[in-house]
Image: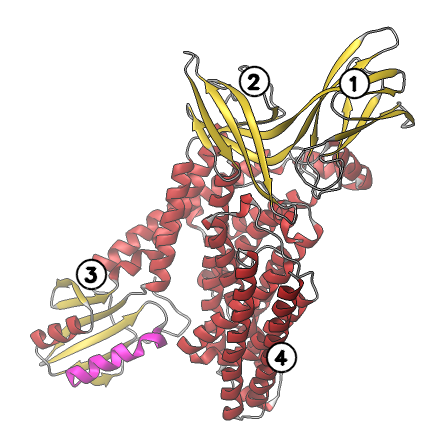
Amino acid sequence: MMDALIVDTGLHWAAVIVYVVAAVGTVYGLIFDRPAAERIGRGLAVAGLGVHAVALLYRWVAQGHGPYMVRYEVLSSNAWVLMAGFLLFARAFPKIRPASIIVFPTTFLLVALGLFQDPAVRKLPPSLRSIWLVLHVSFYKIAFTTMLIALALALLYLMRRFSSLAWLDRLPDGDTLDLYCYRFAGFSFTFWAVGMLAGSIWAYQSWGSYWGWDPVETWSLVTWLLFGAHLHLRRFFGWRGTKAAATYIGCFVVAMIAVYFTPLVEQSLHTQYFR
Amino acid sequence: MSKFLLSRRVILAVILLIAAASMIAYLVPQLSDASPAAVQRWRASYQFLLPVVDALDLDQVFSAPWFAALVAVFFLSLARSTVQQLVAARHRTFGGAAGAGARSFSSGASPDEVDRVMRHLGYLRIFEADGVARYAKHPWGHWGRALLHAGMLISVGFALVVLVTEQRGSTQLTVGETLAPPATWMGEVSGVFARRLELPFTVRVDSVTPTFWDTDDMRQLTAALTFTAPDGIARTETVAINRPVRARGVRVFEDQSFGAAFFVELVGESGGVSKLHMQLPSPVRRGQAGYGDFDFPRVAYRIRAKYFPDDAGKTMLDRDPRLVLRLVDGTGLPAGQAELKVGGESRLGPYRARLAATSRWVGLVFARTFGMEGVFFGFGVILLGASLAYLAPPRTFEVSRADEFTVLSWTPTRFEDAYEDEYGRAIEALGGVARPTGRRQSKLEEDG
């Protein structure tokens, strides 16, 4: 088992290194207008994704279940979905590519943070053996991905608006950044909702109760409601630009409390296994 | 009333108030969930908040009248909005001409040629009247948002039905123990319009079988249960974690609690015998103990107990259990201690203790709910609505004649730049010339 952990963590460190180089290349390319460096950065990100995928698959096979039990693997799989999702979305919507300036560093930071957690394997308890759990965590990972992309676009908008750095002029215009932030906020709202629904179905199947006002559940609902309010402000009150970006950042902070902070400090079903 | 329910400010305020209420329920210990000790500690620490907490029932948010009123307004507003969106979706799909689109071009092509090109591009002709024809791609996408809201409405509605009608009871049963109506529950929940849960059968635990991984994590916990109906017909079912069973309309779940049950005889100085039944939770790792505190009516002391499933510490299974008992008086001082194995005896303070037998126990939850199928149906409608909204955004071409030319106005409802090439292909196929339109939607506007 120790040998397997060494291989597992070794592969993860390799992925971190590739992601770091990818991030440096991309950020350098964006700031200093070097398209070649940007392309190399994206190519390295794909390579990093491949190494990272091998690491996750290796651990999956070794422990017999997916990467959603201990904090080490949760952070790692979140990072993988984040990078894979961003690269796919950037291919479909090229104008969001500058968000890599935030997405790429976040990816390697998540993996690196995970590597400082206990990587010991935990067997899957019977309550977590359900397809609905798989769907529940998968949709939350996708929601986190789209949420972070929207955050990146909101931050870029604010930087463009309030900073006079020359390289910011090469970004898409403010209207475009704002529009894509809106779209990805809508994606994340939907995926977050589906994640909650799948979790409710899993809870009912396991314990006969679809909602228990568990602290993580409560924060998740609060997050979803705040995102709903944000989208209503956008849609029906015409909020855009700075106001929309600022409120979105507030919603994102609440989401991170729900996903990362609450499981650390609270006793609940979610924290029983995910501490 | 309709105006109030459809008011954007009202729905926004309701959403934010429900979010705030949920936060309050997180910050203030709720009487329904928190232990009395935790509630007392909080109240002692935040006495300056107590007038507000007591006046607004902030320690029982989800059963407070004002929260019920909020949910009612939310539900009615959602219902009214859903109806409005369904009407709008129907109009957008089948209704009259919508006017100038985001972009338009004119072409010398004949109506038949236009029809052929539209079909080739995947557009369906869905409307024609007064010289205007509407072609739409993914016209069903107009229903996405409406279905999303309808799904929420269905889910919330049935969730309320579940809430007010559910009957639930939980208990811990030892192997060989029978639970017969009227059951005494360790924990129970009854909806506002429901009576306490009465079982329509008796249930006996025949066996409890835990299995573990070599890491001591639980692999599975199964229990064989015999259900006996009032007519005497018995049926045995096996329940496991994540594998509930159903008996006469009641679902039986296994929660994750289980452990060892100990039958201890205490003989007092006067010769009186107290037969004690103690259920202790299984430890989390081999070599560790499971703990429990007990107060029995005829025993003058509190009994603090711990047990090791295997005295040698080599397995999680209760192969050679060792029970350790400590008597504690009212001031918390120990009054005696004994270590017992099955059949063994020992002095325990003023008593002689004998461990007569051991067994296993398991935690079970019995639930009768109405409306869950409706909640899940609502989930399905939400998924369908979300899929249509994001995966099938409608695009329409409105085709009309102006003099000897055909004018085509193109309107995408969402993600305009993702479908620009469709517009370009239409112009190319019909030899069109772009026209300045009377109205160009800003990138931040969305149809309807």
Q: Amino acid at mark 1?
A: Arg
Question: What amino acid is at disc 4?
Answer: Ile
Q: Residue B11 versus residue B149: which sits nearer the camera?
A: B149
Q: Which of the two discs, 4 and 1, sits closer to the camera? A: 1
| Subunit bearing disc 3 | B
Q: Which residue is mark 2?
A: B178
Residue B354 - label: 1
Q: Is residue A164 visible?
A: yes
Whether residue B2 is visible here, answered yes or no, is: no
Q: Quadrant of residue B272?
A: top right
Q: Which three-letter amino acid code belongs to the residue tagged 2?
A: Thr
Q: Quadrant of the N terminus of chain A?
A: bottom right
Q: Name the residue beneath numbered marker 4.
A: A17
Stretch of the chain drawn in magenta: B416-432
Residue contact between numbered discs 3 and 4, judged by CB atoms under 8 Å: no
Write down the chain letter for disc 4: A
Structural crowding at the residue carrying mark 4, measured as other residues with C-alpha within 10 Å and reported as few (<14), some (14–19) or many (≥20): some
Please tell me whether mark 3 sits on a helix, a strand or a loop. loop
Residue plotted at (49% across, 78% down): A46
Q: In this image, A180 relative to B61: left or right?
A: left
Residue on which disc 3 sits: B96
Mark 1 or mark 3: which is in front? 1
